[in-house]
Structure formats: C-alpha cells, structure tokens
Image (spheres, rainbow, N blue to C red):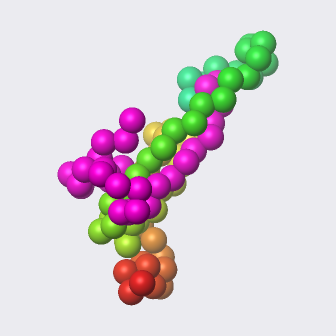
C-alpha cells in the first residue's frame, strides 16, 4: 500500500490519486529475488506502485538500478522546468 512519497528525503503522505505522479512497475518475482529463471518452473508476476508527490515529481522521476532496485532520478533540466510550469 502506498503511504508516502517514493523519494526517501520527502515526508509527503499519499492522500489522493490526482496529487503527484503514480508509477506502476510490473516485475517478475524471480528478478526481485535474484533467482535464475531456469530454476523456477513457472515465472510469477508482481505489480508494485510508487508515488511521487507534486513537488518531487516536478524535479524527479523513478529509475531502476539492478543492484539497488527502484531509485529516484533527477529529471533533465528542460523537463523539470516544463513539468513545474504546467
């Protein structure tokens, strides 16, 4: 369940879908658990949701790093300014 902004440095709490930006990530359980697919008889799917508050979504997005998982990533400067202007 979503409870706060995905940015670890932000304490904004999730209240409404229209505030901020919601991300859906479809992953296989095997990739999250680092179990080789050949050892699993039937791949399972997992859906995770992440949310960035309005303030963070104006400057950040989410990225995936194989070693650490989901991370916040700065938007390119032009995109960050365009998002905050709208």
Residue 39 in the figure: left or right of residue 23: right
Q: Position of residue 62 (x, y in %)?
A: 47, 56
Is 46 located above or below residue 49 in the figure? above
Asked whether 21 falls inside the magenta stretch, the response is yes
Location of residue 21 in the rendering, given as x and y in whole percent from the top left corner: 44, 61
Q: Which residues are magenta?
A: 1-30
Q: Depth check: 26 or 37 in front?
A: 26
**Number of numbered discs overlaid on the protein picture:** 0
Q: Main secondary structure of the magenta part?
A: loop
Q: Quadrant location of residue 34?
A: top right
* Residue ID at (78%, 13%): 41
Q: Is residue 26 visible?
A: yes
From the viewer's perspective, tell me whether residue 37 is left or right of residue 1.
Answer: right
Taking depth in this image into account, of 15 and 69 the one nearest to the observer is 15
Q: Quadrant of the N terminus?
A: top left
Residue 75, quarter of the rendered image = bottom left
Identify which residue, 49 or 69, lies in the foreground: 49
């Amino acid at each position: 369940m979503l409870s706060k902004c995905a940015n670890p440095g932000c304490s904004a709490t999730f209240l409404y879908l229209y505030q901020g930006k919601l991300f859906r990530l479809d992953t296989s359980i095997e990739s999250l658990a680092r179990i080789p697919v050949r050892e699993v008889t039937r791949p399972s799917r997992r859906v995770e949701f992440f949310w960035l508050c309005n303030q963070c979504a104006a400057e950040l997005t989410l990225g995936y790093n194989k070693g650490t998982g989901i991370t916040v990533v700065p938007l390119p400067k032009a995109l960050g300014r365009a998002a905050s202007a709208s």
